[in-house]
Image: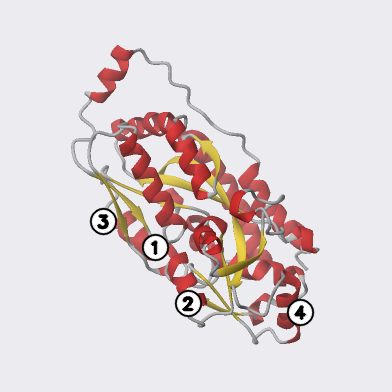
Amino acid sequence: MFSLKKFSAVMCAGALAIGLGACSSTESGGQAKKEENTGYPKKAITVVAPSGAGGGWDLTARSFTKVLGETKLVSQPLTVENKPGGGGAVFMAEYATQQAANNEMLFVNSPPIIINNLKKEGNSPYGYKNTTPLAQLTKDFGAIVVKADSKYKDLKSVLEDVKKDPSKLTFAGGSAPGSMDHLISILPAYKYGVDPTKIKYVSYDGGGEAITALLGGNADVIGTDASSVKEFLKAGKIRVLAVTSTERLAGEFKDVPTAKEQGIDAEFTIWRGVFGPEKMSEEARVYWEKTIDKLVKTDEWKKEVETQGWELEYKNSADFKTFLEEQNQQVRQLLEALGMQK
């Protein structure tokens, strides 16, 4: 049987193994001015969040465009567009086939771009190889969440009920079965000896819809990214039973125990990055690599990352591509062990 230690190693080692990448920029003012006059971008830039509003992708896209505008690193208008469907798979199909050379459309994603391409159910024929990886921006962690008035006060009380009757509770997340939120949801139960295929999981288009379902009584527990529930926790609407980090998080989550603290060795790290189209021009790729490198060094970006409850973990285009190739192999092994590979 596939052990959770191996599960955790597969997901976490891939997310943490590569050190921070950085492309140092030492251009003189004259050189920088020359870069700005190359002609790109000449049009407004759209950054797509392939989900509904309120989830991790949406927040990342909005923070990314907001700080680029505030710092005036990009002179053209920047807009965010939500394109939900299939945990990102619907947008990927459109992007890979219809927007493959659209230099003015970027998008944000995370492990689902790999998972969706490799899983058996709801498989997407398109993945990161149908894009131009531009940069990894941050890392986040999973959270197991219930309503504030739920009878469940800790992770083990949920797992005990699920172990007795796996169909008793409805788990939900903002991604399709076999995708990231699903894996976060079932990870603790799987470690606790529950058959993950017996757990009732309902998927929604984005973390925002999953939270709405939880608050509306249509789900008992959700597995999602910690940062997307921060404001709900602050407002007293939810209770976070556990986070999947190696150590306790700061800020609003300082009193939330890790799954490991509660005797469940369930660790899961969520990276988030920015991608361009597969046939992006060299001019556009170089522009974004240099612009994002400048962005992540600004005080404004560092403050935004802290405000959102993320952790800064930057990899430039080359390092990000290498990392994705390595994690692709690791996720393939994970899905094979769970019998969910295509």
Instruction: Give the quadrant of residue 133.
Output: top left
Tag 2 or tag 1, which sits nearer the N-term? 1
**Separation (CA) of disc 2 from disc 3:** 33 Å
- Tag nearer the camera, 2 or 3: 2
Q: Mark 4 = which residue?
A: 160
Q: In which quadrant of the rendered view does residue 74 lie?
A: top left
Q: Quadrant of the N terminus?
A: bottom right
The secondary element bearing badge 3 is classed as helix
Give the spatial CA distance, label 1 vs label 3: 18 Å
Bin the neighbour count of mark 3 within 10 Å (Cα to Cα): few under 14, some 14-19, many 20 and up.
few
Q: Are marks 4 and 1 in contact (CB under 8 Å)?
A: no
Residue, disc 1: 51
Task: Evaluate if marks 2 and 3 touch, with contact meaning CB atoms under 8 Å apart.
Answer: no
Indicate the secondary structure of the residue bearing disc 1: loop
- Measuring from the top left, give residue 311's x and y in whole percent: 57, 43
> Which residue in the structure is indicated by mark 2?
213
Say what secondary structure mark 2 lies in.
helix
At label 1, counting other C-alpha atoms closer than 10 Å, the crowd grade (few under 14, some 14-19, many 20 or more) is many
Q: Position of residue 134 (x, y in %)?
A: 42, 39
Q: Which of marks 1 and 3 is in front?
A: 1
Residue at the (29%, 12%) spot, across then down:
30
Residue type indicated by callout 4: Glu
Q: Is residue 194 something that shows in the picture?
A: no
Q: Is residue 108 left or right of residue 46?
A: right
Residue 157: give x, y in percent of width and height. 74, 76
Residue 254 shown left or right of residue 134 in the figure: right
**Kind of residue at badge 3:** Gln
Residue type at mark 1: give it. Answer: Ser
- Check disc 3 and report the residue beneath it: 98
Q: Is residue 144 above or below residue 249?
A: below
Q: Which residue is drawn at 81% across and 63% down?
A: 263
